[in-house]
Image (cartoon, helix red, strand yellow):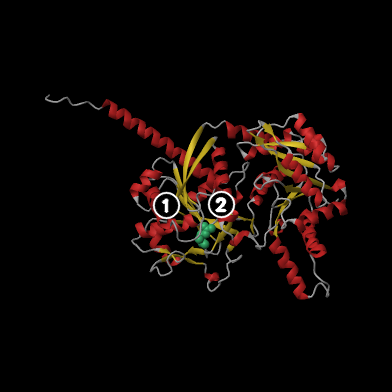
């Protein structure tokens, strides 16, 4: 049987959570035993988001096969069992790249190459490829209807309905139903306009996911149904929630999955959301808080570290804790110990995430030194692992000018240097060490205790690596290399054995963490942070008690 398709479009404004909606529909269908795959089309001309600024685009999510993709793919993987690859994310740029390469090869046999049918055909065949071997393929169209850029994608999904018929395709449109304070009313007009916009390009939506801050009454739903020509039961209240993991439950309550199955003529078993319900229960009933400082740049824009934040939440949920994070601007820590004590002193743990470029590095080094000396749990990811090596080189191995050639090309001690196979490569797009690589873990190390395995596979995205010429100096100073590629070429994990929890990895474990399968590195880091926080609080209490009992000297006696 060939796959059925659910197309998710968005209207009115961006940031309505189309990606989360698509992921949650996937989650619900899986809970009924339906197999799904998900994909996203991004209507911009960049070939991939790899070279875009994190401020413009947010996180670059990396798949096992090394594709640099949109962050919505992270949601797809966290909410479902779909295994995503470069086939699951297409930009206009990549579609055109493909077509122009074909045209140059002469594949079009002299024909005029046009948006319809050539571009739309390319889009449709990308969809069909991803839909192989699953019951339902969920296709998210990035952007907002009415954008000039998204037209070829919208046209392609219109053609898909034409080709495959109603029972094999479902149009879900995500819109906004705002509450206007001045009128004390929910307004349906933006949704009506958005549907009109879709109709003008030949698409009648079957289901409307209405983003709103309150439940839509029956009257509002029937008004929207009437004006937008959808069934009343298909007008869904997509109410704002505090935790993204509640979205599947909200949708199931509104019978989104039952309706999708009905429209697509699919029969399936009853849904089983026990694990999600249990997870959401933990989200709202934590036993305590854990406070973690994330030290980096781009910190004012949380979307640039989407997966990291989620992975920390997963780690906290595994211990029934609520994650409290603060993003600390690294540049503000350059003042040294005092600045660190002031800004980091009340956190249970410190994390330096991935990043690029020189800005903020000295502040990160200060934060790492502070964590090392004060036995505060430290977790360094990619750049955070490289900076940890630099800190150890400078502070423990006496190499005061140690650096990465990324930040100081003239450094006398290139503890971190350009990946050897990238020397001479000037092009920036897709040239990093990307995707899944195997790493061997040394028995008897913290990493081995955390993973409980000798071999792991993790995803990478970096251009610089640990320089093994400094290995003996740094290990003599106290650093332990606990993970490396099986052939020994790349150092993948480092740690400090005489510290309760100080670990850094060259890869990005956050890409593989899921709410129902928290990543061991995050789970163990959060546990160490919480323990440290508890200890600090007890130490402080006993210090206070001691102060209280100290005999007061009275003058003269
Ligand atoms: N800038 C560093 C490198 O390219 C770290 C990259 C990262 O943290 N993702 O190797």
- Residue at mark 1: 496
- In the rendered image, residue 531, in percent from the top left (x then y), is placed at 45, 38
- Determine whether, in the image, residue 39 is placed left or right of residue 372: right
- In the rendered image, residue 368, in percent from the top left (x then y), is placed at 41, 51
Mark 2 lies on a secondary structure that is helix
Name the foreground residue: 31 vs 202.
Answer: 202
Residue at x-position 40% and y-position 36%? 535
Query: How many C-alpha atoms fall within 10 Å of the one at disc 2: few (<14), some, or many (≥20)?
Result: many
- In the rendered image, residue 517, in percent from the top left (x then y), is placed at 62, 43
Residue at x-position 77% and y-position 56%? 127
Name the foreground residue: 555 vs 119.
Answer: 119
Residue at x-position 55% and y-position 71%? 426
Distance from disc 2 to disc 1, alpha carbons, whole Å, reads 29 Å
| Figure label count | 2
| Rendered view: 472 above or below 351 | below
Residue 153 in view (yes/no): yes
- Residue at mark 2: 304
Q: Is the CB–ligand 1 distance for label 1 below 8 Å? A: no
């Amino acid at each position: 049987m060939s796959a059925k398709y659910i197309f998710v479009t968005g209207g009115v404004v961006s940031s309505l959570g189309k990606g989360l909606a698509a992921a949650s529909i996937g989650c619900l269908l899986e809970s009924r035993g339906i197999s799904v795959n998900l994909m996203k089309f991004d209507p911009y001309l960049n070939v991939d988001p790899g070279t875009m600024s994190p401020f413009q685009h947010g996180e670059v999510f990396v798949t096992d096969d090394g594709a640099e993709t949109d962050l919505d793919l992270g949601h797809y993987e966290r909410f479902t069992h779909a295994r995503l690859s470069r086939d699951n994310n297409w930009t206009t740029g990549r579609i055109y790249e493909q077509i122009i390469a074909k045209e140059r090869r002469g594949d079009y046999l002299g024909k005029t190459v046009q948006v319809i049918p050539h571009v739309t055909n390319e889009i449709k065949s990308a969809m069909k490829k991803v839909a192989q071997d699953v019951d339902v393929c969920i296709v998210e169209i990035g952007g907002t209807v009415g954008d000039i850029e998204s037209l070829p994608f919208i046209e392609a999904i219109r053609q898909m309905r034409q080709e495959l018929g109603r029972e094999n395709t479902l149009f879900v449109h995500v819109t906004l139903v705002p509450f206007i304070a001045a009128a004390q009313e929910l307004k349906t007009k933006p949704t009506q306009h958005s549907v009109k916009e879709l109709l003008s390009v030949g698409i009648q939506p079957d289901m409307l996911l209405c983003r709103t801050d309150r439940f839509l009454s029956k009257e509002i739903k029937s008004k929207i149904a009437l004006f937008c020509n959808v069934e009343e039961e298909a007008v869904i209240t997509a109410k704002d929630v505090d935790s993204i993991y509640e979205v599947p439950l909200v949708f199931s309550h509104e019978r989104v999955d039952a309706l999708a199955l009905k429209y697509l003529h699919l029969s399936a078993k009853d849904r089983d959301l026990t694990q999600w319900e249990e997870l959401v229960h933990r989200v709202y009933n934590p036993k305590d808080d854990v406070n973690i400082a994330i030290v980096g740049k781009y910190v004012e824009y949380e979307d640039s570290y989407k997966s990291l934040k989620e992975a920390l939440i997963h780690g906290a949920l595994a211990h029934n804790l609520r994650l409290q994070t603060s993003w600390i601007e690294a540049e503000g820590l350059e003042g040294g110990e005092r600045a660190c004590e002031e800004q980091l002193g009340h956190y249970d743990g410190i994390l330096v995430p991935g990043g690029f470029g020189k800005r903020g590095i000295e502040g990160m080094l200060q934060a790492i030194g502070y964590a090392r000396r004060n036995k505060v749990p430290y977790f360094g990811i990619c750049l955070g692992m490289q900076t940890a090596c630099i800190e150890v080189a400078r502070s423990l191995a006496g190499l005061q000018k140690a650096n990465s050639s990324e930040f100081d090309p003239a450094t006398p001690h290139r503890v971190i240097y350009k990946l050897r196979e990238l020397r001479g490569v000037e092009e920036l797009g897709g040239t990093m060490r990307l995707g899944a690589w195997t790493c061997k873990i040394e028995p008897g190390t913290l990493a081995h205790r955390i993973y409980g395995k000798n071999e792991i596979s993790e995803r990478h995205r970096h251009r610089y690596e640990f320089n093994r010429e400094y290995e003996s100096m740094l290990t003599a100073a106290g650093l332990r290399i606990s993970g490396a590629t099986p052939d020994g070429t790349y150092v993948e994990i480092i740690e400090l054995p005489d510290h309760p929890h100080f670990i850094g990895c060259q890869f990005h474990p956050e890409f593989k963490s899921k709410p129902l399968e928290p990543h061991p590195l995050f789970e163990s880091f959060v546990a160490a942070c919480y323990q440290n926080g508890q200890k600090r609080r007890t130490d402080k209490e006993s210090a206070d008690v001691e102060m209280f009992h100290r005999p007061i000297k009275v003058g003269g006696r």
